[in-house]
Structure formats: structure tokens, C-alpha cells
Image (spheres, grey):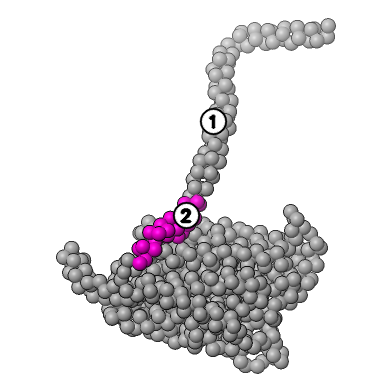
Amino acid sequence: MDITIPVLILAIPFFMFLLLGLAGVKMSHKMAGALGTIGMGTVLVLSYYTAFTYWFSGAPEFIDGTTRLQYTVFNQTWLQFTPALAIKIGFLLDPISALMLVVIPTISFMVHVYSLGYMHGEKGFQRYYAFLSLFSFSMLGLVVATNIFQMYIFWELVGASSFLLIGFFYTLPSAVAACKKAFIVTRFADLGFLIGILILSFYTEQLDFLPMTQNPQAVFESFGGATFMGASVLTWALVLIFTGGMGKSAMLPLHIWLPDAMEGPTPVSALIHAATMVVAGVYLVARLFPLYMLEDAALTFITVVGAITAFYAACVACAQIDIKRILAFSTISQIAFMMVALGVASKYGEAIHEGLGYMASMFHLFTHAMFKALLFLGAGSLIHAVHSNNYTAMGGLRKYMPITHITFLIGCLAIAGIWPFAGFFSKDEILTACFANSTFWGIWMMIVAAMTAFYMFRMYFLIFWWDNPDYEARVKEQEAHGHHASMPHESPFTMAFPLVFLAIVSCVAGWVPFGELVTFDGHEYHIHIDWSIASMSMGVAILAIAFAAWLYMKKNDKPARMADSCRWLWTAANRRFYWDEIYLWITRKVIFDSICKPIAWFDRHIIDGTMDGFAYVTNVASGAIKGLQSGKVQMYVWWFLIGAVLLGVIAAVCVL
């Protein structure tokens, strides 16, 4: 493959970032939005061409019989440390990078189009599109990286660009706090990622993915059986690398940044926190999966963290009021689904069901990107109509917003795993992989799937059915206070088109023969739906939807009575089980008050006090003896004689 198109895929969004960032202030909003959207549209076409060429051209560098190959388009040395150890910048084309070349530009382009309407008239419109281009460039550079250090560089760029986008409304204290929180939490996680990279490269003397993943046994042997604290050093390295993924993908206990990141514009939530950035952790584990297969302890750790996170996030989502935060915790839960699928894909170094879990994880990454972006953009359409994030300000909106209603319903059905929508196929494969590994994990994730259907349709019924508020009275009241207001109405074409497109994709994406395109070893996997599991999962989802309809379809006091019966649990879930309070207590009471303040006191009073004491004694002594430097020669002679006599006396005493 010629390198021109792959280079352009990375160069165009970076150029658009520079152009809009430097010259955007001289442009009109319309021109800046058009340039950013055209640029991403061009990247979309080039990325589709590259991915489809890889999958369907039949070229010998891409496929050998029925086996998908890994192909390095280019790989240029940037920094050479030793003859064997160098940092390179390149473009790797294989099943999962081709998959991400479809996912990232698709969602990014839809967000660019949607933002033309949603962000219309916002101050900093040009800056917003510049940041979108930077983020797209960073994410694309991450997924096509040929080596783990290139991935780390773009990993940090993703963190920087997400910081800028989350804090876009920088005049709002809540947005500033949210972007700082996201940046700081993920930096702690990335420290573990970096240490893991250093350990891995120290033993293997290698940074490139291909040598490590094509011959994982050589990596295992390069560690020479080294252990630390009773565990293999390779296990430590892989777990530390996974901590980077825990931060980006908001796994417990590093999840606290994601709900607050909803302070950014809603299209940003769709781009960063539903479809691309948060799946970077999943992509990281998938990229190094042949190494993780060697260490069951690392995969078990991933499975446990993912399963607990999925259940926790689903519980919290059931008690949230802000619709964007419901979707944020839904994202945490769904990303955890993907992590669990990777964790259960192998046991004792052998892939289970030909690596079904790996394929299912990537399949769900693809389908989830589409319907979760649809749901976030649908939430943006609702917020645009009623000017509130809370479902308490909504109700009966199906009458006013038919396109948003139908597309949002499709997204809810897809994420709930109802046939024939996309989520049914990918989630069924994950549950099948879980049951193949362990009945316990299968039942656990089945419960989470049922909770997913419940909280999504709880939100759906509360928004579109529950009640029909007197919007006319609300408009009159706001206008009486001098505020511009209008009746809820359907969004403009620029916002409606992405909703319709993503809804159509969410209807048909499950029928893609995904196992023939993406597997852990490149061999085709023909998907066979296990209807015993699929019917069970869809049955519990339908029961959960029916329960949500019974509670929330019409306005009643049943939800309030249910919440009152276990008020402590509802309050705890609404407060996210007090994780933020726990972190504040640890940082303020333990770290700042109990550790930092005593250290600061010791520094001020003991260290500084000792130095100040030396200075004081020196000053006092110099003041006391300054008379010795009188300038009188006679006195100098006397002092000289006295000193000589004293030295003589001391010498005599010592001799005698």
C-alpha cells in the first residue's frame, strides 16, 4: 500500500487543528465549522478506503488464505537509544486498527456535523472545532501506532485534547474543575502505564508491537522467570500497563472523572466519552492480547475489575437524574463489558472458543460506539429543546420531537440487547464467552445486562412518556422574567441527520459478519448465536423493560414509594456510593492534613528553624566580636600576644 493516504489520514486533522487554532479567530463561525467538517469528511473517506482495502482487496500483504495479516505501512525511526531499542513513528494496519479507522472518523464526522447546529452561536466556536481536530488526530495516531511508545505519546495527546474539550466552557467553575479532575486522575493511571512500558522494554529490549505479539513466547522467555513479591514480573508489567487503560476507560477506582466530564459540550461527550477515548483502554489490552494470554493472573485481574465496575456503574445509573450522567455511567458499564470479554477470552494460555471473548469485545466496541454516540447526541437534542440536563424538566417529549424520540428508542433497544438491533449480537457473544469461561461470570454479566435494560428504559419513559408538563406556561413564565424561551421542538437538520444515520447503523451493524473480519489471531471465526443464552439474555432484558414501563410509563407514586422503602440505598447510588467523598477524605484528611501538614510544619520549624538559628547565632557572635576589628594597630598587637600566650599555655599543658 502506498503511504500517501495513511499519511494524509494523520496529517489532515493535525493541519486543521493548526489552521483553525491559529487563523480561526479571523474566520466566521460558518467557515470554521465548514472547514473542520470538510477536513474530517475527507479523513472519513480516506479511512474507509484504507480499512476496506485491507479487509476486501484480497491483497497478499493483507490476507493469506483466510488469515488476516498485520501490515506495517511505514515505520520511521525517531529516537535511537541502542541498536535494538528505538522509538519509531509508523502506521500499522491489522484487523483492530482497521476497525478503529471506521469507528473514529465515523463518530468524529457525525459530531462535526451535529455541532454545526448544537454549538451555533457559541463563543469560541472556532476553538471548539480546532480542539475536535486535535482530538481526532490524537486518537487516530494512537490506534495505528506500530510500537507501544508511539501509542503512549498519542495516549497523552488524547488526554491533553480531552482536557481542552471538557473545559471548553472555561468560564464555568464546574467545567474547569471537571477538566482538571479528568487530567489528574488519568495522569496517575498513565504513570502506571509508563512504568509497565519501561519494565517490558527493559526485559525484551523491544518496543514494536509485531515482534512482541507475533512471538509472545519469546517475550515470556526474555523475563527469565523473574518474580517480584511472589508474582511474575511480566504479570506486574501487564497489570501496570492495564492501569493506563483503567484510567482512560474509567474502571474502578479510577472512574471518578468520567461523570464530571459531562460538563463539556454534549457532542464532546458523544465523541470522547462514548465512542473513542474511553475505549482506548480496551484497545490497549486487545493490542497486547497475545501477551496477556500468557499470564492468567493478569487476565483474572482484568475480569474482576471489569465485572465489579460494570455492576457498580449500572447500580449508579439507576438513581441518576441528569440524563448525561446516566449515559456516562452506562458508558462505564459497557466499557467494563468489553474488558470482561477480553478477560474471559483465554484460560491457562489457551484461547476459549477460538478467542470468542476477544472477537466479542471488539464487536461490542464497534456496535456500542454507534448506539452510544446516538444516545448522547439524542440527549443533546433534548437538552437543546428544554435547556436542562435533568429528566425532571422533561416528559411527554415524543409529541414534540418525533425524530429524536424514534432514534433514541432505537438506541435504547440496541443497548438493551433486543433483537435485531446491533447490541443484541455483540452482547450475546460477550455473555456466551463469559459462560464458556465460568458460569459465575456468565450469571454476573447477565444481571448487569438486565440492569442496563432497566435504567435505559427508565430514562426513556421519564423523558418521552411519564408526564406532559405545561410547556406553554413554562415558556410564559420564563419570558415574563426576560428570558428567551420556546416550546420544545425538533432539532435542525444538522443535528437530526447524525441521529438518523447512527440509528440506521444501530439497526444493521449487528448483521456484519464480524468474526470474519476481526479475531485475535487473524483466523476467521464464524459467529454462531447460542440461542439458549441469547433467549435468556433477551428474556431478562424484556422483563427489565416491562418493569421500567410499569414504574415510569405513566406518572405515579410507585417510584417514590420504592425509593422510600430503601432510601439509604437510593441515596448512596445517587451519590455514586460516595467515591468522590472518599477521595476527598483521603486527599484532604489523610494526605494533606495528616501527612503534608506535619511535613510542612517540620520543614518550617525544624529545617528552616535550624538554618535560621545558625544565622542568628552567627549574627550575634559577629556583633559581639566586631570590636576586635577596630582598626587600631596597638590593639591588634595585644590580641596577637594574648593569642600566642594562650597557644603556649595549651601546648605546655598538652606536653606535660
Where 552 sits versus 642, above or below? below
Residue in the image at 42% along x and 77% along y? 546
Residue 640 vertical placement versus 423 (above, below): above
**Is residue 567 within the magenta segment?**
yes
| Mark 2: amino acid | Tyr
Task: Indicate the secondary structure of the residue bearing disc 1.
Answer: helix
Residue 525 screen position, x and y as percent? 66, 86
Image coords of residue 569 (percent x, y): 45, 58
> Mark on residue 423?
none
Q: Is residue 81 above or below residue 41?
A: above
Nearest to N terminus: mark 1 or mark 2: 2
Which part of the image, by quadrant, shows the N terminus? bottom right
In the displayed structure image, the side of residue 90 where residue 424 appears, left or right: left
Q: Residues within 10 Å of mark 2 (few under 14, many from 20)?
A: few
Q: Which residue is mark 1?
A: 605
Q: Amino acid at mark 1?
A: His
Nearest the viewer among 13 and 478 is 478
Which residues, given as a range, are shown in magenta?
Answer: 558-583
Tag of residue 578: 2
Membership of 175 in magenta stretch: no
